[in-house]
Image (spheres, rainbow, N blue to C red):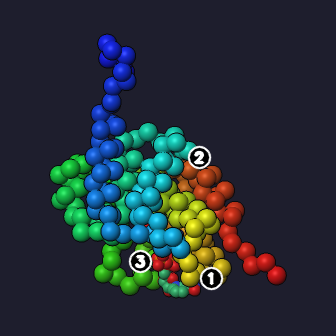
Amino acid sequence: MRDRGGAVKIAGMTKQLMTALAFAADKHRNQRRKDADASPYINHPIALANLLLNEAGVEDQRVLIAAILHDTIEDTDTTEQELVKHFGKDVADIVLEVTDDKTLPKADRKRLQIEHAAHISRRAKLVKLADKICNLRDITASPPADWSIQRKQEYFDWAKSVVDRLRGVHPGLEHLFDKTYDGRPRLVI
Ligand code: NDP
Ligand code: ZN
């Protein structure tokens, strides 16, 4: 929409997205990804929202905002109450659906992600799909420095086990996942 001077007006959705970006950037400010260059953590939530909007055509504001915030409860001191206060209960609920219980051992958390995938909401499934696609892309392009090919393969296969249980929600995103999975690292003999 343009005002009388011809300037493009900022829509409400853009304002909310900026608020979420600023919030997530602040919460993740001292965190880095596991790649050799230790990229800023915020690159990852931004990658999810960018993938959802610009590659998969997902325009659902709650999904995009939840994608930006998806690791705040799991990986920072952010509380459910904070998310409800700033972004509403719908967004907070999506983030909670994609949040692991960090009091559990890693193996249990990985098993529970597979078990829960089919039972989360449609919006949470979209965020989960984007998260898995982005992590596979990261492992392909900028992997954790010390990961063997076998460990990368295990991650690819576990991600596929999760995604296979939530299919039927967005063919475009599922196709993007499959294309990314096709790049599963292989041992060259
Ligand atoms: P981690 O959970 O430790 O690491 C993967 C997670 O790290 C991703 O889900 C992602 O989470 C985040 N991440 C940050 N930076 C990157 C990046 N550059 N690329 C990809 N992901 C990144 O590893 P695993 O999933 O492998 O889980 C650990 C399990 O691995 C344990 O169960 C253990 O038994 C097993 N293990 C296997 C070994 C092997 O050699 N096969 C060796 C040691 C452990 P997010 O999106 O939330 O940021
Ligand atoms: Zn993530």
Any atom of ligand 1 within 8 Å of the CB at mark 1? yes
Q: Which image quarter: residue 116?
A: bottom left
Q: Residue 148, which numbered label? A: 1
The answer for how far apart the CA atoms under marks 2 and 3 are is 27 Å
Q: Position of residue 85 (x, y in %)?
A: 17, 52
Q: Position of residue 72 (x, y in %)?
A: 31, 63
146 displayed left or right of 104: right
32 displayed left or right of 18: right
Q: Which of the two discs, 1 and 2, sits closer to the camera?
A: 1
Say which residue appears at 33% left-offset and 57% top-offset: 25
The answer for how far apart the CA atoms under marks 1 and 2 are is 30 Å
In which quadrant will I find the C terminus?
bottom right
Q: Position of residue 126 (x, y in %)?
A: 46, 52
Q: Which image quarter: residue 127?
A: bottom left
Instruction: Determine which residue is flagged by label 2.
Output: 172
In which quadrant will I find the N terminus?
top left
Q: Residue 109, which numbered label? A: 3
